[in-house]
Image (cartoon, rainbow, N blue to C red):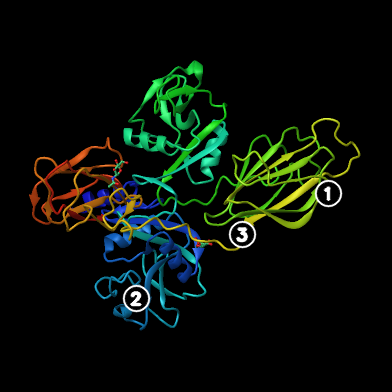
């Protein structure tokens, strides 16, 4: 029996489950997701980092798990922390697991004579040598080691991104960029140009561009020279809504937002180097260390540069003169949501044709300031939003030949007071206790027919938009229902639209909890319509996330 279970385990160790594990975690056993971090930390910092991922340091309750962790960690020679702390030497019972799963009395992997609390109350395990996989005592405050974070499978991850649908965050961007530039901009959000996998998702993306809608937006579809389509984010090509495909028109794709050459929502081949607005997408909860780090002082600047949070950037060729830079250079700065982006130019020596314009938003065409000459100062220019665009226009002809050093340095940062993103409206609104036709209602919440538990009016038409965050789904549980059987109907839809799939149509009398509906994504639409006659007390319903 040993061989099959060992094989099974090693298979599971390498199975990445994007569906059930938080981003970056690997499924270790059916409900344990793990992530090895080889950036050494003290025990307390390691523990805090695991919490930041929605998990905790590993807690080990069997020899099989102990082996699996050792295998996972053995890619590094540095030992790893366990989420265990002891208070009495020689007593595994005195060691408590961080995840509150009890003490190490039932199972422990201590080396002979351990724990030894005089050495330290924390516990670690080497990956090599005679003690590999054995548990040893270590000083929590001085030792810095690798660590493994563990999170439960299906731990719903929360995310503050503004546009969420079915487990993903979307970033609609009105600025026009080529495909390469757009993908680079997406990567700054740990995202990719969006892939699309269902009609619902296609519709959702269309609705992201309702104000100032451009004619076309770029999506992450690419066509190779065998005419095979794929998604830039590597996901499977399992849905398509192509209106017209012809690689003579280009090997990238755009979605039409109007009934133009193809109808709204359809995709059409387009040139990759054409600049169009675009939409990025990433899984909810995805975090990244900006690996595609910006070039702070490019030799030449031929495309927009993207910078997050705060930092310093310089004119092309810094510390040398930028003379010779042929193109304007744009810098897109963004600071955390809720803050305002600020920039200052403590070094500035521009040639007499050059300028630096500062815009509040990337799509703005009227600058909030234009700087010229030698206007170095510590003054901060503040955006009205958490983004800012700085455009540097150097001289292109008749540039100074005096050999002088023309250059500038900029610092940017968020305004000091970072405020929380405004909370989403939570039900019930005191002016509209039923929730009928209110803005989106977020779980947990309660809806009723108007006037409930009094009689509802005739000629009623109510919509209830139920929503929950991220990867959660909605459970709607009706209390007692009383409507006119023939004609006053409650319709529950699986999704945000009137066209979404109907989960149920209810009328007449039903006892409490006999009608329960579950959505398959994070939104649900309930409608209630009544005709000219016949009334009842209507309904109440509690909706929660699951
Ligand atoms: C832990 O998290 C902090 C802040 O989130 C970060 O600065 C630090 O580098 C992380 N340490 C490790 C070892 O990952
Ligand atoms: C709810 O909205 C619909 C559609 O906009 C409208 O026809 C209806 O009269 C509204 N119902 C109420 C009670 O305001």
Residue drawn at the location 41% of the way across and 51% of the way down: 24
In the displayed structure image, the side of residue 81 where residue 419 appears, left or right: right
Q: Which element carries disc 1, helix, strand or loop?
A: loop
List x then y, in percent, for residue 315: 74, 44
Residue drawn at the location 77% of the way across and 41% of the way down: 355
Mark 3 → mark 2, Cα distance in angstroms: 56 Å
* Discs 3, 2 touching: Cβ within 8 Å: no
Q: Which residue is mark 1?
A: 374
For label 1, count other residues whose C-alpha is less than 10 Å away and answer few (under 14), some (14-19) or many (20+).
some
In the displayed structure image, the side of residue 436 where residue 299 appears, left or right: right
In the displayed structure image, the side of residue 44 where residue 493 appears, left or right: left
Q: Which residue is mark 2?
A: 112
Report whether residue 319 is seen: no
List x then y, in percent, for residue 407: 79, 45
List x then y, in percent, for residue 399: 85, 34
Q: Quadrant of the C terminus?
A: bottom left
Q: Which element carries disc 2, helix, strand or loop?
A: loop
Mark 2 → mark 1, Cα distance in angstroms: 71 Å
Tag in front: 3 or 2: 3
Mark 1 → mark 3, Cα distance in angstroms: 25 Å
Count the marks. Answer: 3
Tag in front: 2 or 1: 1
Q: Residue furthest right?
A: 402
Which numbered disc flags the more N-terminal residue, 2 or 1? 2
Quadrant assignment, res 432: bottom left
Residue drawn at the location 37% of the way across and 69% of the way down: 83
Instruction: Classify the position of ligand 2 by quadrant: top left, top right, bottom left or bottom right.
Output: top left
Which numbered disc flags the more N-terminal residue, 3 or 2? 2
Q: Which element carries disc 3, helix, strand or loop?
A: loop
Numbered circle sitting on residue 415: 3
């Amino acid at each position: 029996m040993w061989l099959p279970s060992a094989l099974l385990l090693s298979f599971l160790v390498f199975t990445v489950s994007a569906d059930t594990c938080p981003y970056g975690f690997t499924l270790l056993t059916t409900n344990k997701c793990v992530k090895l971090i080889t950036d050494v930390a003290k025990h307390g910092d390691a523990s805090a980092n695991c919490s930041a991922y929605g998990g905790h340091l590993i807690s080990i309750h069997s020899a099989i798990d102990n082996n699996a962790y050792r295998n996972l960690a053995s890619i590094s020679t540095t030992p790893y922390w366990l989420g265990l702390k002891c208070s009495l030497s020689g007593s595994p019972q005195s060691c408590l697991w961080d995840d509150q799963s009890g003490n190490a009395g039932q199972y422990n992997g201590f080396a002979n004579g351990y724990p030894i609390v005089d050495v330290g109350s924390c516990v670690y395990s080497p990956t090599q040598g005679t003690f590999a996989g054995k548990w040893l005592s270590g000083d929590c405050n001085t030792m810095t080691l690798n660590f493994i974070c563990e999170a439960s499978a299906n731990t719903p991850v929360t995310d503050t991104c503004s546009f969420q649908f079915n487990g993903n965050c979307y970033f609609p961007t009105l600025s026009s960029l080529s495909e390469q530039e757009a993908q680079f901009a997406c990567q700054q959000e740990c995202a990719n140009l969006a892939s699309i996998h269902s009609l619902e998702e296609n519709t959702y993306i269309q609705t992201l561009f309702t104000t100032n809608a451009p004619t076309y937006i770029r999506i992450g579809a690419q066509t190779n020279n065998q005419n095979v389509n794929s998604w830039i984010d590597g996901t499977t090509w399992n849905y398509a809504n192509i209106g017209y495909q012809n690689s003579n028109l280009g090997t990238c794709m755009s979605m039409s937002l109007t009934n133009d050459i193809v109808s709204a929502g359809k995709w059409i081949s387009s040139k990759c180097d054409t600049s169009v607005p675009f939409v990025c997408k990433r899984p909810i909860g995805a975090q990244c260390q900006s690996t595609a780090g910006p070039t702070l002082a490019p030799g030449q600047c031929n495309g927009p540069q993207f910078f997050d949070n705060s930092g310093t950037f310089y004119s092309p060729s810094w510390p040398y003169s930028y003379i010779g830079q042929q193109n304007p250079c744009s810098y897109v700065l963004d600071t955390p949501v809720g803050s305002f982006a600020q920039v200052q130019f403590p070094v500035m020596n521009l040639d007499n044709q050059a300028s630096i314009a500062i815009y509040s938003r990337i799509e703005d065409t009227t600058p909030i300031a234009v700087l010229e000459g030698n206007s170095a100062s510590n003054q901060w220019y503040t955006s009205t939003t958490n983004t800012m665009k700085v455009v540097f226009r150097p001289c292109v002809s008749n540039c100074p030949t005096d050999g002088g050093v023309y250059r500038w340095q900029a610092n940017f940062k968020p305004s000091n007071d970072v405020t929380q993103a405004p909370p989403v409206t939570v039900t019930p609104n005191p002016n509209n206790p039923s929730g009928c036709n209110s803005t989106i209602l977020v779980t947990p919440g309660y809806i009723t027919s108007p006037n409930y538990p009094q009689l509802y009016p005739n000629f009623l038409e109510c919509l209830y938009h139920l929503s929950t965050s991220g990867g959660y789904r909605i459970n709607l549980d009706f209390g007692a229902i009383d409507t006119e059987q023939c004609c006053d109907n409650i319709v529950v839809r699986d999704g945000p639209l009137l066209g979404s799939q109907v989960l149920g149509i209810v009328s007449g009398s039903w006892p409490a909890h006999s009608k329960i509906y579950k959505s398959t994504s994070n939104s649900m639409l309930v409608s209630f319509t009544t005709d000219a006659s016949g009334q009842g007390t209507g309904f109440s319903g509690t909706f929660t996330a699951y």
